[in-house]
Image (cartoon, rainbow, N blue to C red):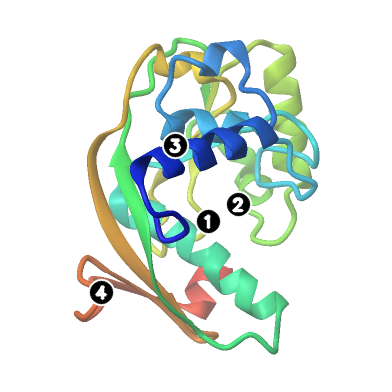
Amino acid sequence: MRLVDSLEEQSILESILEESKPPLPPAARPLHYLLATPFRYRPAHGSRFRAALEPGVWYGGEALRTALAEKSYWRLRFLLDSPETPELRPVPHTAFTAAVRTSAAIDLTRAPLVRDRAVWTNPESYAGTQALAASAREARLQVIRYQSVRDPEHAACAAALTPLVFGRGKPRSQETWFIAAGRTRVRCARDERGGATWEFAARQLLG
């Protein structure tokens, strides 16, 4: 809206932007963009359960604190990887809930897979988890439940390997959170001007 003078111009701009993006996979097309977007792109940099240029993965935390910790890690990582960048002032992020339904899932927090916990929770290397995800896709599994590495309380997260687990669902309970990041701590607050609701030390997020 800051770039245009009317809703009509905004619609035109949105159409131009949409045409420049990769097409959505058919299974993701019925979904709200907050659920569909992760499946649209194949970034050159990998994540815990997605190697570089592989199909997208949607990540969610079972607790709000866990999701904020995971997001805070990436804000901190950005700063640590760009030493000349000043600390990041509060930036709004949308937190929401979503229902995931599938019977084709594995849980890395339970036996027998928990025996390899050191691999699944490695704070620096994603080689083991990416290899696991590749095998999971071959076996047509849809969700991987795992322990959060970034949440100091190590609650659970879910990695959705396919948009099919959302059906035609939409996100619920949307709310805005502000994340401010420095090199020693990251603060998450409901109010841009208020104090932190959760604060994570860099050493906690880095594992």
Number of residues whose C-alpha sits closer than 10 Å to that of mark 4, classed few (under 14), some (14–19) or many (20 or more): some
**On screen, 166 above or below 189?**
above
Instruction: Please give the residue where the numbered disc 2 appears in the rendered image.
Output: 121
Mark positioned earlier in the residue sequence (3 or 1): 3
At numbered mark 3, what does the secondary structure look like: helix, strand or loop? Answer: helix
Q: Which mark is residue 11?
A: 3
Task: Residue at 38% x, 16% y: name it.
Answer: 101
Q: CA distance from mark 2 to mark 4?
A: 32 Å
The residue lying toward the viewer, choosing from 107 and 103, is 103
Quadrant of the drawing holding the N terminus: bottom left
Q: Report crowding for label 2: few under 14, some 14 to 19, many 20 or more residues within 10 A (C-alpha).
A: many
* Count of marks, rendered view: 4
Look at the numbered discs 1 and 2 and tell me whether their residues touch, using CB distance below 8 Å.
yes
Between circles 4 and 1, the one closer to the viewer is: 4
Name which residue type carries label 2. Thr
Task: Judge left or right: residue 26 versus residue 165.
Answer: right
Q: Tell me the residue that label 4 is attached to.
A: 192
Q: Contact, CB < 8 Å: mark 2 with mark 3?
A: no
| In front: label 2 or label 4 | 4
First-in-chain label (2 vs 3): 3
**Amino acid type, residue under disc 4 in the picture:** Glu
- Is residue 18 positioned above or below 52 on the image? above
Q: In this rendering, does residue 21 appear at all?
A: no
Q: Is residue 71 visible?
A: yes
Q: CA distance from mark 3 to mark 4?
A: 29 Å
Residue 92 picture quarter: bottom left
Identity of the amino acid at label 1? Val
| Type of the residue with mark 3 | Ser
Alpha carbons under labels 2 and 3: distance apart: 44 Å
- Quick one: SS at disc 4? loop
